[in-house]
Image (spheres, rainbow, N blue to C red):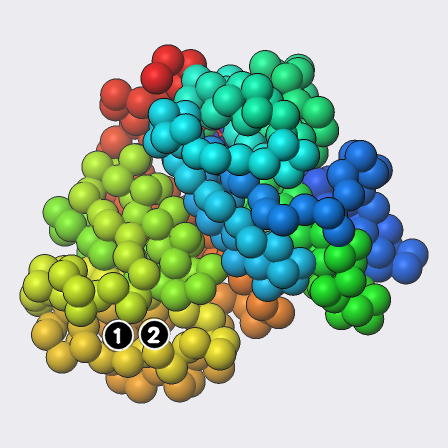
Amino acid sequence: DKGNYKHFMAKEIHEQPEVIGHTISRYIDLNDYSTVVPEASAIDFTKLDRLVITACGTAYYAGLVAKYWFEKYARLPVDIDIASEFRYREMPVKAGDLALFISQSGETADTLASLRYCKDKGMVIGSVVNVPESTIARESNVVFPTYAGPEIGVASTKAFTCQLTVLAALAVHAGRMRGTLSEAQAKGLVETLSELPSYTRQALALSDQIEEMAHWISQTNHALFLGRGTSFPMALEGALKLKEISYIHAEGYAAGELKHGPIALIDETMPVFVVAPHDSIYEKTVSNMQEVAARGGRIVLITNGKGAEAAGLEAHHIITVPDVPEIATPIVYALPLQLISYYTAVFMGTDVDQPRNLAKSVTVE
Ligand code: M6R
């Protein structure tokens, strides 16, 4: 049931504050802002040398964001790969290390094959899944559920942000266990995560502004998305969403890669979406943005208030996202990126919930 919405995707985008709230409440204790991960009691985080993460599509991008978090907060090196590559790569893995599989459906063929490879090698199998009775969940030693509820739209939205929510809580938990975060630091991070429902609700208020941009975006055949740090995987996700449902060719790049090739594409017709919260690497991303502006590229800057102030006149459009602490940024910035693709696709009249050639669950390789 779509309720009052035109598409399941719109409904699912708007459900995010609520389902992220359900999800985070399972992983933190609001009384003392500690992480509560009973599922993880079987895992000795202090003994792990590394974490292997494998997934496909949007779930893979959630894993890419998580790599930044696990490495920063838990000082745990992460190897992450696309499941279709991992499964045939015969990667050397260590028995007893943790392998994490991320999947909304829990039925993705390549992810499942990768899981079986790791299980065979004696790794501990953890999964972040949205369907608790799925094959991936059943074959895991430890399941970290997302509580997004059924996701009908082929384009993953609420499942993605709930995956990120679980992974953020897990990274903080691992940091506590490994002693790489002090109790005070961990509490601060948990407090931020507890505010996610409110932060994402504020981000939804960007809908009207983004809807007004849809006509302009729909006139392009190509777009670039740029970001650094955790905003790099978010750029990949923004590009995937746009191509999936609007069929506009979009590429996501690490902003620092711009001058290693993609800058050749920039001309007056090329929209460039720059995902850049005002953080420690903001200046670097802005200098990439200036390079785009100097070549006539049409910039849409997605940033917070401070970032908007510091941006100068280069951006043609600025989408000002609520000001949130760093760990919350990927989750909050996901919403404007989803809204960009949603409204563009609606404007173009494509089949938003059932884009051509795509299936919700990819059970064949
Ligand atoms: O069910 P899964 O999370 O394993 O699915 C993985 C991908 O097929 C999925 O995320 C796909 O990329 C979506 N259509 C993205 O919106």
Q: Is residue 185 above or below residue 146?
A: below
Neighbor class of circle 1 (other Cα within 10 Å; few <14, some 14-19, many 20+) is many
User: Label 1, on which residue?
Assistant: 289
Question: Residue at position x 58%, y 68% from top?
Answer: 326
Q: Amino acid at mark 1?
A: Met
Image coordinates of residue 170 in percent, x first then y, are: 69, 48
Q: Is mark 2 within 8 Å of ligand 1?
A: no
Out of 25 and 67, give the one closest to the viewer: 67
User: Label 2, on which residue?
Assistant: 285
**Would residue 347 be found to the left or right of residue 160 on screen?**
left
Image coordinates of residue 281 in percent, x first then y, are: 43, 76
Image coordinates of residue 189 in percent, x first then y, are: 72, 64
Neighbor class of circle 2 (other Cα within 10 Å; few <14, some 14-19, many 20+) is many
Q: Is mark 1 within 8 Å of ligand 1?
A: no
**Would residue 1 be found to the left or right of residue 238 on screen?**
right
- Please say whether residue 328 is visible from this viewpoint: no
Query: CA–CA distance between discs 2 and 1?
Result: 6 Å
Q: Is residue 94 above or below residue 167?
A: above
Out of 270 and 174, give the one closest to the viewer: 174
